[in-house]
């Protein structure tokens, strides 16, 4: 066998030419496929049931987000960031606001920092709950876990809606604060939700975490090594499931995160089950952060009184703002020439970069496993294709 | 069957010799356990209450489509909870999100693969017109340029209630169809194309940029200066 033709993936993987083999089967999954979480396409080459090659095809949802960001004003891009990762609009808003605030040297009042943390952690709850539901649907439990997840999602969305006016596309953060001040009633409602969320997680976990079928289906599937994850730039729960302690909330200490007590859950095997477990444990930590933030929420202005909304023109320069989003490091890189629009606007999309290791995780697995491996990456095509 | 639609068939399709039965007479008969209906009523009634959507999400709006099928909004109340993964089993294409130029041929292909009778809902600003991304170079400015759209649901994203409302509107529309004549649905008309041309990506853009049979550029009428 020609060693140059060997593909990574261990002994059970055969060499593949790009040209079509007589005894290999090429299957195109997507762009319309219920398990691809949107319009994503995988061209999978199969040897029997085993995957010997996987070619992802992107771009079915390329909405020229970055180009549009250069043609509208700084504030005008804020609603577009909602539509990047449409399950976690609040964290996208925050990352973008941080980038612009860095560019303009804009301080943020303390109350706004607390509200941002509360909203980001609510978003994390929402995102991870939905992801667990979708992942279980990919495993074949169609319906029940997703129904439970969406029931909780509606409760969080009601909070978002009463605060920002929109369920999904919140467009809530501003440069130097937040758009509206949460009322005491809203804070109370959030407190109730956070107080009940632990019970929901207990119920959810009682159904799923120790479930024998789910363990058999997900353990040892789609293993990602820590070295490869670091080399590929994987971030977020995907990276932590491989056992690498990396969390921007700890290492960057942005916002008021240093004031809160929380742990960073780590996996040990880097398989699908660990990725699920890390997310569930992260939700428990999010509840702790939320409890502390709600207890310590200070008064004061929500918006820096000197912040300039109209005619906003930061001085020439560049800035990169990033936060720990639910899917990983979401960052915005902005170059300003002193005008009202960014000269260059670039998004660091966590799920796109996490997706680059998909083939490495899928090689040697069965085609049914590819579905749950993709589900465990937690992609949102709005962010992957932008 | 007790809630079969009551409007009598329009007189144009009644044989001339039979006088049309009045609503009062029908109600009287129904009280005696006799249900009078026409094939047309039965057909549209059955059609309208079992609209099975295609399990097909495009972008953000798809999340609200999923939310509409979940416990809180429960699209099952309207007979449409059976999301089919295969276009061969689906009646309704919900275009739920941004259609890019790379995706447009696949959407038209899916539409061609669905068996008649089939309906299309354009959900959200993007599917209707390109929405917030209309200025971009890669976004189709409305799916109605290639396939016939029955119901438009504005919003970015439309709330799940809006989708349910759109579905009810579609059911009303189906109930208004006749089996023959000018009110017949598209697929029962002789002039129906059946297959819609799938656009190809040409040198610079989709070719053709729209299907002239279903869409033509609106003519601008300038207001007279008074
Ligand atoms: S209409 Fe709005 S919410 Fe719907 S797909 Fe387009 S951008 Fe997303």
Image (cartoon, grey):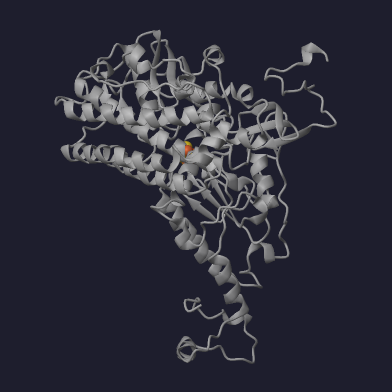
- Residue furthest to the right: A22
Residue A193 makes an appearance in the image:
yes
- The percent position of residue A62, horizontal first and vertical second, equals 57, 29
Viewer-proximal residue among A5 and A62: A5
Q: Position of residue B57 (x, y in %)?
A: 55, 43
Q: Residue at x 47, y 59 (%)?
A: B76
In this picture, is B14 found above or below A160?
below
State whether residue B195 is above or below residue A21: below
Give the side of residue A95 with respect to residue A143, left or right: left
Query: Is residue B161 shown above or below A76?
Result: below
Q: Is residue B131 visible?
A: no
Compare residues A20 and B1 and report the one nearer the observer.
A20
Residue farthest along the top direction in this orientation: A317
Quadrant of the rendered image containing residue A320: top left
Residue B197: x %, y % from top left: 72, 47
Q: Is residue A42 left or right of residue A196?
A: right
Q: Residue at x 69, y 46 (%)?
A: B109
Determine the residue located farthest toward the left in the rendered image: A299
User: What is the tally of numbered marks visible in this picture?
Assistant: 0
Picture coordinates of residue A146, whole percent (x, y): 45, 45
């Amino acid at each position: 066998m020609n060693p140059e033709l060997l593909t990574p993936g261990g002994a059970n993987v055969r060499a593949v030419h790009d040209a079509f083999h007589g005894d290999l089967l090429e299957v195109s999954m997507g762009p319309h496929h219920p398990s691809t979480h949107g319009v994503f396409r995988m061209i999978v080459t199969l040897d029997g049931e085993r995957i010997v090659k996987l070619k992802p095809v992107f771009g079915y949802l390329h909405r020229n987000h970055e180009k549009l960001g250069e043609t509208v004003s700084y504030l005008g891009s804020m609603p577009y960031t909602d539509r990047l990762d449409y399950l976690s609009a609040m964290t996208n808003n925050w990352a973008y606001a941080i980038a612009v605030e860095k560019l303009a040297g804009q301080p943020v009042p303390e109350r706004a920092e607390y509200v941002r943390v509360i909203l980001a952690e609510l978003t994390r709850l929402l995102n991870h709950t939905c992801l667990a539901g979708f992942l279980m649907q990919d495993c074949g439990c169609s319906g029940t876990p997703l129904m439970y997840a969406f029931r909780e999602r509606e409760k969080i969305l009601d909070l978002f809606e009463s605060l920002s006016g929109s369920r999904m596309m919140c467009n809530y953060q501003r440069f130097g604060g937040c758009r509206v001040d949460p009322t005491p009633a809203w804070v109370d409602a959030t407190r109730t939700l956070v107080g009940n969320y632990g019970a929901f997680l207990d119920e959810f976990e009682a159904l799923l975490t120790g479930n024998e079928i789910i363990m058999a289906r997900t353990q040892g599937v789609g293993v990602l090594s820590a070295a490869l994850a670091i080399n590929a730039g994987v971030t977020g729960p995907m990276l932590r499931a491989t056992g690498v302690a990396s969390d921007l909330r700890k290492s960057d200490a942005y916002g008021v995160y240093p004031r809160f007590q929380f742990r960073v859950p780590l996996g040990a095997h880097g398989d699908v089950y660990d990725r699920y477990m890390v997310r569930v444990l992260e939700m428990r930590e999010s509840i702790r952060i939320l409890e502390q933030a709600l207890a310590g929420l200070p008064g004061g202005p929500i918006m820096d009184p000197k912040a300039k909304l109209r005619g906003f023109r930061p001085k020439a320069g560049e800035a990169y703002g990033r936060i720990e989003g639910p899917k990983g490091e979401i960052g915005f890189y902005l170059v300003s020439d002193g005008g009202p629009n960014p000269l260059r606007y670039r998004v660091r999309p966590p799920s796109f970069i996490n997706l680059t290791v998909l083939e490495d995780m899928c090689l040697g697995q069965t085609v049914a496993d590819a579905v749950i491996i993709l589900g465990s990456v937690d992609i949102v095509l709005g962010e992957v294709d932008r | 069957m007790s809630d079969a639609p009551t409007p009598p068939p329009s007189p144009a399709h009644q044989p001339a010799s039979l006088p049309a039965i009045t609503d009062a007479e029908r109600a009287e008969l129904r009280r005696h356990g006799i249900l009078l209906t026409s094939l047309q009523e039965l057909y549209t009634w059955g059609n309208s209450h079992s609209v099975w959507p295609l399990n097909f999400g495009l972008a953000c709006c798809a999340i609200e489509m999923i939310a509409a099928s979940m416990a809180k909004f429960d699209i099952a109340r309207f007979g449409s909870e059976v999301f089919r993964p295969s276009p061969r089993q689906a009646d309704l294409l919900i275009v739920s999100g941004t259609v890019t130029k790379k995706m447009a041929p696949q959407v038209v292909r899916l539409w061609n693969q669905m068996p008649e009778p089939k309906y299309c809902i354009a959900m959200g600003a993007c599917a209707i017109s390109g929405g917030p991304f209309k200025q971009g170079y890669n976004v189709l400015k409305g799916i109605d340029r290639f396939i016939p759209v029955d119901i438009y649901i504005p919003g970015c994203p439309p709330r799940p209630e809006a989708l349910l409302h759109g579905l009810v509107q579609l059911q009303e529309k189906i109930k208004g169809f006749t089996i023959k004549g000018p009110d017949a649905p598209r697929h029962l008309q002789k002039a129906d194309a059946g297959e819609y041309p799938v656009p190809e990506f040409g040198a610079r853009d989709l070719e053709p940029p729209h299907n002239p049979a279903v869409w033509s550029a609106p003519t601008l009428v300038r207001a007279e200066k008074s």
